[in-house]
Amino acid sequence: MANFLVFTFYIVLVLSLANGYINGVDAGRPFFVFGDSLVDNGNNNFLATLARADAPPYGIDYPTGRPTGRFSNGLNIPDLISKELGSEPTLPYLSPKLRGEKLLVGANFASAGVGILNDTGFQFIELIRMHKQLDHFEEYQKKLSVIIGDEKAIRLVNGALVLISCGGNDFVNNYYLMSNSLRSRQYDLPKFVNYLITEYKKILLRLYDLGARRVIVTGTGPMGCVPAELALRGGPNDECSAELERAASLYNSQLFKMIVELNREKGSDVFFIVRMDEKGDFQTEFVETKEACCGQGPYNGIGLCTLASNICQNREDYLFWDSFHPSEKANKLIVEKIMTASTEFIYPMNLSTILALDSKNNNTI
Ligand SMILES: *[C@@H]1O[C@H](CO)[C@@H](O)[C@H](O)[C@H]1NC(C)=O
Ligand SMILES: *[C@@H]1O[C@H](CO)[C@@H](O)[C@H](O)[C@H]1NC(C)=O
C-alpha cells in the first residue's frame, strides 16, 4: 500500500512537471527580472519610497482591477513575457508570497526609480539599487538550493530567461533632474554616457557570473518624447526635447556596441538588445501618442497620476498611461516585437527564436 502511494505520487509528480504545473504553480521556463519601473512588479510597495504605484487608478485594467505596484493601467512587460513562457507573473522578491514552490517560477527584483548609478533616484528616498538587486538574486539562489538542491538550482538559473531594464532614470532622474546637476557638472553628455555604459557592463557581467545565460536588455525609450518631458522641455509645436533625444540616441548606440562586445567576450549569444526608441514605430497603432492617459497639465505630463488626475476613457487609444510609462496596449506591442521582430528591433535574435533554440538544446530543467 505504501509503495503504491509512493508510486502514485511519483506518477502525479512526473505528469505535473511535464505540464509545467507544480503543486498549483504555473511554471514554464523560469524568469528573472531586474531594473526599474518599466519592469517592477511591486517591490517598491514594501519600501519607504516615493516611487510607488500602489494606489488607484494604477491597475485599473489589471485582472483584479486593483493597483499592484506596476506602473501601468494593466499588465506590464514582464507579465506579458511570463504569459509567453506559459508561467504565472513573477512575484516581487520582497513579497512574503515568494516562497516554497513559487520560487521555481523565478522572481522579480526590480525597483521603480533605480538607475545604473547608485546616486540615481536619491530623491525617491528608499530604492533597491542594482547591486542590491543582484545581492537579492544571490540570496534567492540559496533559498532555491534548499528546496531543490545545489545542482538543480544552478541548472534552473542557467536555463532561465532574464530581463533587465535600466538606464533611463540615470538621465531623467539624475543628469537632467535639475539644471546644473552634480553629474552634468562632472561630465559632458558623451562622457556621462561612456561612464554609464562602463558601469552597466559591470552589472551585466555580475549577472552572468551569477548564472544568467539568456538576458534580454532593453535600451531606453524615446526619453525626450514622453509626456513629462514634452511638458517640461518640449518645443512649441509638440517637438520632443532635442537634448534628451540626443542622450537616448548616444546611450542606445553605445549600449548596442557594449552588448555585441560582451557576447564576443563570452563566445556566445547571452545578451539580447531591444531597441525601444523608434518613435515612428507605434504612431499608427494609437489615436494619442503625446498626451498621457492619466495626469494633469500640458500633455497630462505634470505631477503624479492619482484619482484627482484626468483619466482617459479609452485607454487602448493611448501610447502612454502616465507621464513616463507606456500603456498596457503599448506593452503588448513591445512584447509582440520582442517575440517576433527582426534584428532591427531585437539583436541578435528574437525571443521566439531563442525559445525554439533552447528547447531543441533542452537547455531548461
Ligand atoms: C554602488 O554601490 C555598491 C555598494 O556600495 C558598490 O559596490 C558599487 O560599485 C557602486 N556602484 C557605482 C557605480 O558606484
Ligand atoms: C524571428 O527571428 C527568426 C530568426 O532570426 C526569423 O526567421 C523570423 O523571421 C523572426 N521573426 C520575424 C517576424 O521577423
Image: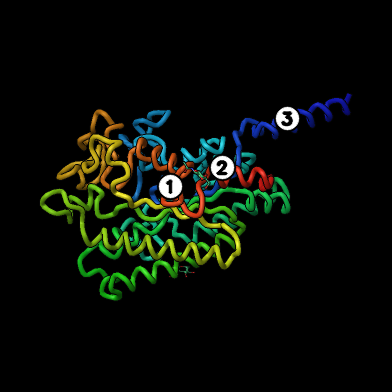
Q: Earlier in the sequence, mark 1 or mark 3?
A: 3
Q: Residue at x 39, y 48 (%)?
A: 38
- 315 lies above or below 241: above
Label 1, label 3: how far apart the Cα atoms are: 32 Å
Amino acid of disc 1: Val
- What number is the disc on residue 217? none
Q: Residues within 10 Å of mark 2 (few under 14, many from 20)?
A: some
User: Secondary structure under badge 2?
Assistant: loop
* Residue situated furthest left in the rendering: 236
Image quadrant where one finds the N terminus: top right
Rendered image quadrant of residue 101: top right
- What number is the disc on residue 39? 1
Query: Does residue 196 show up?
Result: yes
- What number is the disc on residue 15? 3
Q: Residues within 10 Å of mark 3 (few under 14, many from 20)?
A: few
356 displayed left or right of 126: right
Q: Nearer the viewer, residue 39 or 194?
A: 194
Q: Nearer the viewer, residue 112 or 279?
A: 279
For label 2, the residue is 98
Q: Residue at x 43, y 61 (%)?
A: 256
* Residue situated furthest bottom in the rendering: 186
